[in-house]
Each structure stands twice: as structure tokens, then as C-alpha cells.
Image (cartoon, helix red, strand yellow):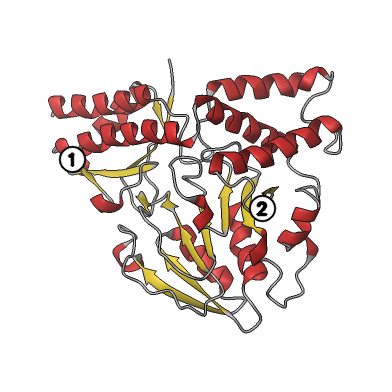
């Protein structure tokens, strides 16, 4: 039976990416060696890293605009620490928007480096909406936000105009929608949502914002060191970088972000229309802030849970159980999820309505 993978991450990737990556595990680039055993200093892998870094900038429209792309380790969680270490000045301060669990984790890390101002928060409402109408201090060293909140199913639809550098955690919606990415000074994203397997993080940096903290930054945490070494300061996660490159190539072959954005909007519209139409379900997030990547929804009557769970499992649906912080269900509709899989879920929701 075909599986319809709604896992929040690690998540679905394009079938052709799986096939090419699997072949590379057996024999990479007709070298007679596996991608898992080649040297990261080999010409073959250096070419992979260079193409991956360049293609990331190309897809984001940042080529030739003073940006560098890095493939690093430690997940977005390490960037929670690395961002303030590289941007917050000695005796400086930073502004943060608290819109979800991961944003809150980033705030906790920043507090170790200096004054950390939370300019807006939806924590008291269990992060059901994106905070708005907030003010970013003009003397902040940077402003940090999280574009999409995987757990709670909310997404920023617009970003503030500010004179301070803007840092954005785009782990769960990178490459999914068209934005003016030049408005951001640092973008970081764990690969395991829309780009590749767990184990590598894409960090895109406008170089001019670096080197202004007055801090003595350890080399492994210093963005400038990683830029100088072209993501090779330490041994990179070779397989994760290669698989990310395959996914970026797949996205480019489809026509890039503008094309995938239309597909993502169609998938989200299909599911949210059913959530709002079907009296047995209700959305968990405020409508105006709903994520096109992660749809969170609840049963109106929990007495139907056992029946619904049996039905979606029988249909080959996987990974839609909601996070414990929200409950209910979470359908993660990342770039590689086909709209046919969304239709299967919608059909099951209709069938439940007919059965009750």
C-alpha cells in the first residue's frame, strides 16, 4: 500500500531523490566508492558542496548580493546559540519574537549573551497566533523571528520593516514560498523538513553583518571561520549535504520556489477547506496565521478519535498525530508531498462524517 507521509521531520522527500541517494550509497559518481565512504576533501565531494552552496543562493535569489551559504552541523538548535554569539555585541541587546516552542528556545540561548528583549509573544494563548503590532528597538543588534511554527501550525505572512539586521529561523518552510530573501541578514534552517535528511543545517549569511561584536568567538562557532573554509572547517555530513543538493536540483527542475509555492497553496487550501467545512473537525491555529506547511486540527468530539485513527491508518496515512503541546492532528505538507496524498486525508475526513 502506498504511504502518505505527513511526518513533521524527518519528513518526506521526492522519490527521485531517494533513488539517486540510494544509488550513491552503492556507487557514487561511478567512482566505485559509496557516498558514505568518500573523502570530504575529494574533488567529487568538493564539487557537491560548491554546487549545493551556490544553488541554495540561486533559488533564494541571493546570488551576487553579498551572501554566503553554509552547510553546518548541530541543527537549528545550535544556531540559537551561534546567532547571538556572532551578532550580539558586548553589552549589546537583541530583539526576539516569541511565536512558538523553537522561538522560545532561541530566546533562552540568547539570554546567555546579553539583554534579550521579547517584543511580542503568543505564549499565553498556547501560540495559536503570530504576534503583531510590536516595536523593534532601533538600537538592537538584531531582530530574530521564526517564520513557521511546526508544532502549533502558524506562519508569519509578513515581516517587519526595521533598520536592524533581521535573522530568521526558516527550518520548516525554507524553499516553500516566494519572499524577498534579501530583507533577511541571516536565514537558517534544519534540512530535515524541505531539503534533506537530518544532520545538516543551511545557514545563509549577509557577510557585512559579521565581525562587529567585539567578542572572542571560538572558531567552530564563528561564521567567518566557516565562510573562510567554505563549510569545510570540520568534516561535513557528506551524505546529508549530497541529499540536500539532490533536493535543491529537484526543486530547480520543477521551476523553483514560485512553482512549488502554488502547489503548496493548493494543498493547504484543499485541507483547510475540509477542516472548516466538516463539523467533526476544527482548526487549532487562528485562521489568518495558518501555516501552509503544517496544518493543526482537532476533533470536535474526542469520542470519534478511535474510529478516525483506524480509518486514516487503513488509508495508508502516516505521521499525522499532533504534538503533545497541541493534541489532535498535524498534517505536515512539505514540498515533496503530492496533492494526491492530501486528497486521501480529505476523503477519510469525509468518510468519517458520513459514518457518524
Secondary element type, mark 1? helix
Front residue of 348 and 102: 102
Residue at the location (66% across, 69% down)? 85
In the picture, the disc for residue 29 is none
In the picture, measured across the screen, residue 211 lies left or right of residue 191, that is right
Front residue of 56 and 103: 56
The quarter of the rendered structure image containing the C terminus is top left
Q: Position of residue 102 (x, y in %)?
A: 48, 58
Query: Which residue corresponds to mark 2?
Result: 74
Q: Position of residue 275 (x, y in %)?
A: 22, 38
Q: Is residue 65 above or below residue 281?
A: below
Please report whichever mark, 1 or 2, sits nearer to the chain's N-terminal start: 2
Q: Position of residue 43 (x, y in %)?
A: 85, 32
Q: Is residue 141 above or below residue 33?
A: below
Front residue of 258 and 245: 258
Q: Position of residue 287 (x, y in %)?
A: 24, 50
The image quarter in which residue 147 lies: bottom left
* Label 1 to label 2: alpha-carbon separation: 39 Å
The image quarter in which residue 19 lies: top right
In this view, which residue lies farthest toward the bottom?
Answer: 91
In the picture, the disc for residue 276 is 1
Q: Give the crowd class for mark 2: few <14, some 14-19, many >=20 residues within 10 Å.
A: few
Q: Is residue 319 visible?
A: no
The image quarter in which residue 236 lies: top right
Circle count:
2
Amino acid at each position: 500500500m502506498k504511504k502518505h507521509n505527513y511526518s513533521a521531520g524527518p519528513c518526506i522527500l521526492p522519490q527521485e531523490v531517494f533513488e539517486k541517494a540510494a544509488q550513491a550509497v552503492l556507487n557514487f559518481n561511478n567512482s566505485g566508492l559509496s557516498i558514505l565512504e568518500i573523502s570530504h576533501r575529494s574533488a567529487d565531494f568538493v564539487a557537491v558542496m560548491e554546487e549545493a552552496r551556490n544553488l541554495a543562493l540561486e533559488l533564494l535569489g541571493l546570488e551576487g548580493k553579498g551572501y554566503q551559504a553554509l552547510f553546518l552541523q548541530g541543527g537549528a538548535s545550535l544556531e540559537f546559540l551561534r546567532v547571538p554569539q556572532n551578532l550580539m555585541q558586548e553589552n549589546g541587546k537583541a530583539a526576539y519574537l516569541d511565536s512558538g516552542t523553537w522561538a522560545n528556545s532561541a530566546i533562552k540561548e540568547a539570554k546567555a549573551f546579553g539583554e534579550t528583549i521579547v517584543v511580542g509573544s503568543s505564549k499565553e494563548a498556547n501560540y495559536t497566533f503570530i504576534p503583531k503590532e510590536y516595536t523593534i528597538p532601533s538600537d538592537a543588534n538584531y531582530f530574530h523571528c521564526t517564520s513557521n511554527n511546526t508544532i502549533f501550525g502558524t506562519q508569519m505572512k509578513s515581516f517587519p520593516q526595521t533598520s536592524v539586521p533581521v535573522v530568521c529561523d526558516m527550518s520548516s518552510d525554507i524553499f516553500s514560498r516566494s519572499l524577498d530573501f534579501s530583507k533577511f541578514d541571516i536565514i537558517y534552517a534544519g534540512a530535515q523538513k524541505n531539503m534533506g535528511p537530518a544532520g545538516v543545517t543551511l545557514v545563509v549569511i549577509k557577510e557585512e553583518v559579521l565581525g562587529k561584536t567585539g567578542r572572542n568567538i571560538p572558531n567552530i562557532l564563528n561564521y567567518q571561520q566557516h565562510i573562510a573554509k567554505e563549510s569545510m572547517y570540520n568534516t561535513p555530513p557528506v551524505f546529508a549535504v549530497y541529499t540536500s543538493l539532490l533536493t535543491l536540483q529537484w526543486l530547480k527542475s520543477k521551476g523553483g520556489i514560485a512553482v512549488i509555492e502554488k502547489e503548496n497553496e493548493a494543498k493547504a487550501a484543499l485541507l483547510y477547506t475540509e477542516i472548516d467545512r466538516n463539523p467533526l473537525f476544527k482548526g487549532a491555529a487562528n485562521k489568518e496565521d495558518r501555516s501552509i506547511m503544517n496544518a493543526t486540527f482537532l476533533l470536535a468530539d474526542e469520542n470519534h478519535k478511535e474510529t478516525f485513527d483506524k480509518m486514516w491508518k487503513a488509508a495508508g496515512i502516516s505521521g499525522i498525530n499532533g504534538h503533545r503541546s497541541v493534541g489532535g492532528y498535524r498534517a505536515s505538507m512539505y514540498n515533496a508531498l503530492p496533492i494526491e496524498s492530501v486528497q486521501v486525508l480529505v476523503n477519510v475526513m469525509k468518510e468519517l462524517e458520513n459514518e457518524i
